[in-house]
Image: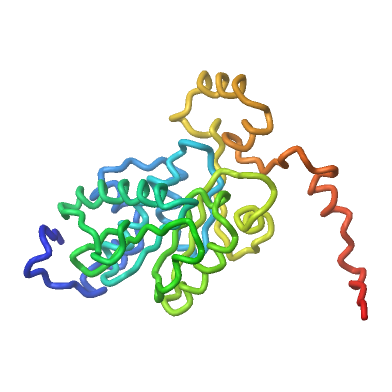
Amino acid sequence: MNWQTFDDVRLPTRGDFPAAVENDAASFARNRLGLVPDAKQTEVLQSTAKRGILNCSRQWGKSTVTAAKAVHRAYTRPESLVLVASPCERQSAEFLRKASVLVRKLHIRPRGDGDNACSLLLPNGSRIVGLPGTEATVRGFSAVSMILIDEAARVEDALYMSLRPMLAVGDGDLWLMSTPRGQRGFFYEAWQGGGEDWMRLSVKATECERISPEFLDGERAAMTEAWFQQEYMCEFRGDGTEVFPRELLEAALDESIPELQFD
Protein backbone atom coordinates (compact mmCIF):
# COMPACT_ATOMS: atom_id res chain seq x y z
CA MET A 1 0.00 0.00 0.00
CA ASN A 2 1.57 3.27 -1.14
CA TRP A 3 0.04 6.64 -0.24
CA GLN A 4 1.43 9.52 -2.27
CA THR A 5 -0.77 12.45 -1.25
CA PHE A 6 -3.75 13.16 0.93
CA ASP A 7 -6.08 13.77 -2.03
CA ASP A 8 -8.71 11.13 -2.83
CA VAL A 9 -7.11 8.60 -0.53
CA ARG A 10 -9.23 5.81 0.89
CA LEU A 11 -8.63 5.43 4.60
CA PRO A 12 -7.74 1.76 5.10
CA THR A 13 -9.14 -0.39 7.87
CA ARG A 14 -7.23 -2.63 10.24
CA GLY A 15 -8.03 -5.56 7.94
CA ASP A 16 -5.96 -4.07 5.12
CA PHE A 17 -2.78 -5.26 6.83
CA PRO A 18 -2.10 -8.94 7.59
CA ALA A 19 -1.35 -9.70 11.21
CA ALA A 20 2.19 -10.65 10.24
CA VAL A 21 2.83 -7.14 8.91
CA GLU A 22 1.14 -5.40 11.82
CA ASN A 23 3.06 -7.40 14.42
CA ASP A 24 6.53 -7.44 12.84
CA ALA A 25 8.01 -3.97 12.96
CA ALA A 26 11.49 -5.43 12.41
CA SER A 27 10.70 -6.69 8.90
CA PHE A 28 8.86 -3.44 8.22
CA ALA A 29 11.95 -1.47 9.27
CA ARG A 30 14.23 -3.52 7.04
CA ASN A 31 12.03 -3.83 3.98
CA ARG A 32 10.13 -0.55 3.97
CA LEU A 33 12.27 1.90 5.94
CA GLY A 34 15.72 0.80 4.83
CA LEU A 35 17.04 0.24 8.34
CA VAL A 36 19.34 -2.60 9.34
CA PRO A 37 18.61 -3.22 13.03
CA ASP A 38 21.06 -5.25 15.06
CA ALA A 39 19.94 -8.19 17.20
CA LYS A 40 18.93 -6.10 20.23
CA GLN A 41 17.19 -3.48 18.11
CA THR A 42 15.33 -6.28 16.34
CA GLU A 43 14.21 -7.54 19.75
CA VAL A 44 12.74 -4.12 20.52
CA LEU A 45 10.98 -3.86 17.18
CA GLN A 46 9.52 -7.35 17.42
CA SER A 47 8.37 -6.95 21.00
CA THR A 48 4.63 -6.84 21.57
CA ALA A 49 5.07 -5.84 25.22
CA LYS A 50 2.64 -3.25 26.51
CA ARG A 51 5.36 -1.77 28.74
CA GLY A 52 9.02 -1.53 27.77
CA ILE A 53 12.18 0.07 29.16
CA LEU A 54 15.39 0.61 27.19
CA ASN A 55 18.34 1.32 29.48
CA CYS A 56 20.98 1.65 26.80
CA SER A 57 24.27 3.38 26.14
CA ARG A 58 24.54 6.75 24.48
CA GLN A 59 24.58 6.47 20.68
CA TRP A 60 23.15 2.95 20.65
CA GLY A 61 20.19 4.09 18.55
CA LYS A 62 17.35 4.31 21.06
CA SER A 63 15.62 7.19 19.28
CA THR A 64 16.03 5.69 15.81
CA VAL A 65 14.66 2.27 16.69
CA THR A 66 11.70 3.68 18.61
CA ALA A 67 11.00 6.16 15.79
CA ALA A 68 10.74 3.14 13.49
CA LYS A 69 8.41 1.50 16.01
CA ALA A 70 6.27 4.65 16.08
CA VAL A 71 6.07 4.90 12.27
CA HIS A 72 5.18 1.22 12.01
CA ARG A 73 2.36 1.67 14.52
CA ALA A 74 1.01 4.78 12.79
CA TYR A 75 1.24 3.25 9.30
CA THR A 76 -0.36 -0.11 10.07
CA ARG A 77 -3.06 1.07 12.48
CA PRO A 78 -5.25 3.75 10.91
CA GLU A 79 -6.44 6.62 13.10
CA SER A 80 -3.90 5.74 15.80
CA LEU A 81 -2.24 8.38 17.98
CA VAL A 82 1.40 8.10 19.03
CA LEU A 83 2.74 10.60 21.57
CA VAL A 84 6.43 11.38 22.01
CA ALA A 85 7.56 13.06 25.22
CA SER A 86 11.03 14.23 26.22
CA PRO A 87 12.62 16.73 28.63
CA CYS A 88 11.96 19.62 26.22
CA GLU A 89 10.09 20.39 23.01
CA ARG A 90 13.35 20.66 21.06
CA GLN A 91 14.17 17.02 21.77
CA SER A 92 10.66 15.94 20.85
CA ALA A 93 11.06 17.84 17.57
CA GLU A 94 14.35 16.04 16.90
CA PHE A 95 12.57 12.72 17.38
CA LEU A 96 9.85 13.83 14.94
CA ARG A 97 12.54 14.73 12.38
CA LYS A 98 13.82 11.16 12.51
CA ALA A 99 10.27 9.88 12.10
CA SER A 100 9.77 12.25 9.14
CA VAL A 101 12.81 10.81 7.36
CA LEU A 102 11.34 7.34 7.78
CA VAL A 103 7.91 8.45 6.58
CA ARG A 104 9.47 9.79 3.38
CA LYS A 105 10.83 6.31 2.71
CA LEU A 106 7.21 5.17 2.56
CA HIS A 107 6.70 7.69 -0.27
CA ILE A 108 4.57 9.87 1.97
CA ARG A 109 5.14 13.61 2.10
CA PRO A 110 5.42 14.58 5.80
CA ARG A 111 3.03 17.23 7.04
CA GLY A 112 1.72 18.41 10.38
CA ASP A 113 -1.71 17.70 11.80
CA GLY A 114 -2.72 21.38 11.82
CA ASP A 115 -3.18 21.47 15.60
CA ASN A 116 0.21 20.68 17.09
CA ALA A 117 3.42 22.46 16.10
CA CYS A 118 5.46 19.27 16.43
CA SER A 119 3.46 16.57 14.63
CA LEU A 120 3.12 14.21 11.69
CA LEU A 121 -0.18 13.33 10.04
CA LEU A 122 -0.40 10.26 7.83
CA PRO A 123 -3.01 9.84 5.08
CA ASN A 124 -4.69 7.05 7.06
CA GLY A 125 -5.51 9.53 9.83
CA SER A 126 -2.77 8.40 12.21
CA ARG A 127 -0.72 11.02 14.03
CA ILE A 128 2.66 11.16 15.74
CA VAL A 129 2.76 14.16 18.08
CA GLY A 130 5.81 15.52 19.89
CA LEU A 131 5.08 17.05 23.29
CA PRO A 132 6.76 19.82 25.28
CA GLY A 133 8.46 18.84 28.49
CA THR A 134 5.97 20.39 30.92
CA GLU A 135 3.07 18.63 32.60
CA ALA A 136 0.74 21.63 32.41
CA THR A 137 0.67 21.71 28.58
CA VAL A 138 0.28 18.03 27.60
CA ARG A 139 -3.20 17.23 28.88
CA GLY A 140 -6.12 16.74 26.53
CA PHE A 141 -5.09 13.67 24.53
CA SER A 142 -7.06 10.45 24.86
CA ALA A 143 -7.26 6.92 23.41
CA VAL A 144 -3.51 6.98 22.79
CA SER A 145 -2.11 3.94 20.98
CA MET A 146 1.51 4.41 22.08
CA ILE A 147 3.52 6.74 24.30
CA LEU A 148 7.29 6.98 23.86
CA ILE A 149 9.31 8.86 26.46
CA ASP A 150 12.78 9.76 25.18
CA GLU A 151 15.58 10.57 27.65
CA ALA A 152 13.13 9.38 30.29
CA ALA A 153 15.60 9.69 33.17
CA ARG A 154 15.55 13.45 32.60
CA VAL A 155 11.77 13.82 32.33
CA GLU A 156 9.93 15.10 35.41
CA ASP A 157 7.77 12.62 37.33
CA ALA A 158 4.78 14.98 37.03
CA LEU A 159 4.86 14.74 33.23
CA TYR A 160 5.08 10.96 33.37
CA MET A 161 2.14 10.71 35.76
CA SER A 162 0.02 13.00 33.59
CA LEU A 163 0.72 10.90 30.47
CA ARG A 164 -0.11 7.44 31.84
CA PRO A 165 -3.91 7.93 32.07
CA MET A 166 -4.02 8.73 28.34
CA LEU A 167 -3.40 5.03 27.63
CA ALA A 168 -6.49 3.82 29.46
CA VAL A 169 -9.20 3.96 26.78
CA GLY A 170 -7.05 2.73 23.90
CA ASP A 171 -5.16 0.15 25.98
CA GLY A 172 -2.00 1.72 24.59
CA ASP A 173 1.68 0.83 24.89
CA LEU A 174 4.26 2.68 26.96
CA TRP A 175 7.98 2.68 26.20
CA LEU A 176 10.70 4.46 28.17
CA MET A 177 14.19 4.90 26.74
CA SER A 178 17.17 6.59 28.34
CA THR A 179 20.58 6.34 29.86
CA PRO A 180 20.52 6.42 33.67
CA ARG A 181 20.64 9.64 35.64
CA GLY A 182 21.07 8.86 39.31
CA GLN A 183 19.01 6.66 41.58
CA ARG A 184 15.76 8.58 41.46
CA GLY A 185 12.73 9.25 39.31
CA PHE A 186 10.20 7.06 37.51
CA PHE A 187 12.74 5.65 35.04
CA TYR A 188 14.93 4.32 37.86
CA GLU A 189 11.95 3.08 39.87
CA ALA A 190 10.41 1.27 36.90
CA TRP A 191 13.74 -0.33 35.99
CA GLN A 192 14.53 -1.44 39.52
CA GLY A 193 11.12 -2.39 40.86
CA GLY A 194 8.43 -1.90 38.25
CA GLY A 195 7.48 -5.57 38.24
CA GLU A 196 7.14 -8.23 35.59
CA ASP A 197 4.84 -6.12 33.40
CA TRP A 198 7.91 -4.37 31.97
CA MET A 199 10.03 -5.73 29.15
CA ARG A 200 13.55 -4.58 30.10
CA LEU A 201 16.51 -4.32 27.76
CA SER A 202 19.98 -3.01 28.60
CA VAL A 203 22.83 -2.56 26.12
CA LYS A 204 26.23 -1.30 27.26
CA ALA A 205 28.53 0.58 24.91
CA THR A 206 30.94 -2.36 25.00
CA GLU A 207 28.14 -4.49 23.52
CA CYS A 208 27.53 -2.15 20.60
CA GLU A 209 29.76 -2.85 17.61
CA ARG A 210 29.18 0.68 16.27
CA ILE A 211 31.11 2.16 19.22
CA SER A 212 34.84 1.47 19.08
CA PRO A 213 36.97 0.51 22.09
CA GLU A 214 39.32 3.39 21.23
CA PHE A 215 36.48 5.89 21.51
CA LEU A 216 35.44 4.47 24.88
CA ASP A 217 39.00 4.65 26.16
CA GLY A 218 39.05 8.34 25.32
CA GLU A 219 35.70 8.92 27.00
CA ARG A 220 36.75 7.11 30.16
CA ALA A 221 39.84 9.33 30.37
CA ALA A 222 37.79 12.50 29.83
CA MET A 223 35.15 12.02 32.55
CA THR A 224 34.75 10.67 36.04
CA GLU A 225 34.29 6.93 36.42
CA ALA A 226 30.78 7.38 37.82
CA TRP A 227 29.75 9.53 34.86
CA PHE A 228 31.28 7.07 32.38
CA GLN A 229 29.45 4.17 33.99
CA GLN A 230 26.13 6.01 33.66
CA GLU A 231 26.57 7.28 30.11
CA TYR A 232 28.07 4.17 28.57
CA MET A 233 27.65 1.21 30.92
CA CYS A 234 23.99 1.68 31.91
CA GLU A 235 24.65 1.87 35.66
CA PHE A 236 22.49 3.90 38.02
CA ARG A 237 24.97 5.82 40.16
CA GLY A 238 24.40 8.23 43.02
CA ASP A 239 25.34 11.87 42.53
CA GLY A 240 28.02 11.79 45.23
CA THR A 241 26.06 13.80 47.78
CA GLU A 242 24.51 10.87 49.64
CA VAL A 243 25.91 9.86 53.05
CA PHE A 244 24.94 6.21 52.54
CA PRO A 245 24.47 4.39 49.22
CA ARG A 246 20.82 3.80 48.32
CA GLU A 247 21.42 0.05 48.02
CA LEU A 248 22.64 -0.07 51.63
CA LEU A 249 19.57 1.77 52.92
CA GLU A 250 17.18 -0.43 50.96
CA ALA A 251 18.91 -3.56 52.22
CA ALA A 252 18.42 -2.35 55.79
CA LEU A 253 14.65 -2.06 55.44
CA ASP A 254 12.55 -4.75 57.14
CA GLU A 255 9.07 -4.83 55.63
CA SER A 256 7.86 -7.26 58.31
CA ILE A 257 7.93 -4.46 60.89
CA PRO A 258 4.60 -2.55 60.89
CA GLU A 259 4.66 1.18 60.32
CA LEU A 260 4.39 3.41 63.35
CA GLN A 261 1.02 5.07 63.77
CA PHE A 262 0.85 8.56 65.23
CA ASP A 263 -2.26 10.27 66.61
Q: Which is nearer the eye, 47 or 241?
A: 241
Q: Residue 195 placed where, x, y %? A: 65, 63
Q: Is residue 67 above or below residue 198?
A: above
Would residue 258 appear left or right of 1 to someone viewing this image? right
Is residue 176 rendered to the left or right of residue 65? right
- Quadrant for the C terminus, please: bottom right
Q: Residue at x 68, y 52 (%)?
A: 184
Position of 201 relative to 123 (above/below): above
Left of 51 or right of it: where is 83? Answer: left
Q: Residue at x 57, y 61 (%)?
A: 198
Q: Residue at x 69, y 48 (%)?
A: 183
Q: Which residue corresponds to the image point at 51% horizontal and 74% vertical from the top-left? A: 165
Q: Is residue 53 above or below residue 196?
A: above
Image quadrant where residue 230 sits: top right
Task: Pick the residue in front: 103 or 201.
Answer: 103
Residue 36 horizontal/vertical position (percent): 33, 40
Rendered location of residue 56, percent (x, y): 53, 43
Q: Split into 4 quadrants, where in the image is the N terminus? A: bottom left
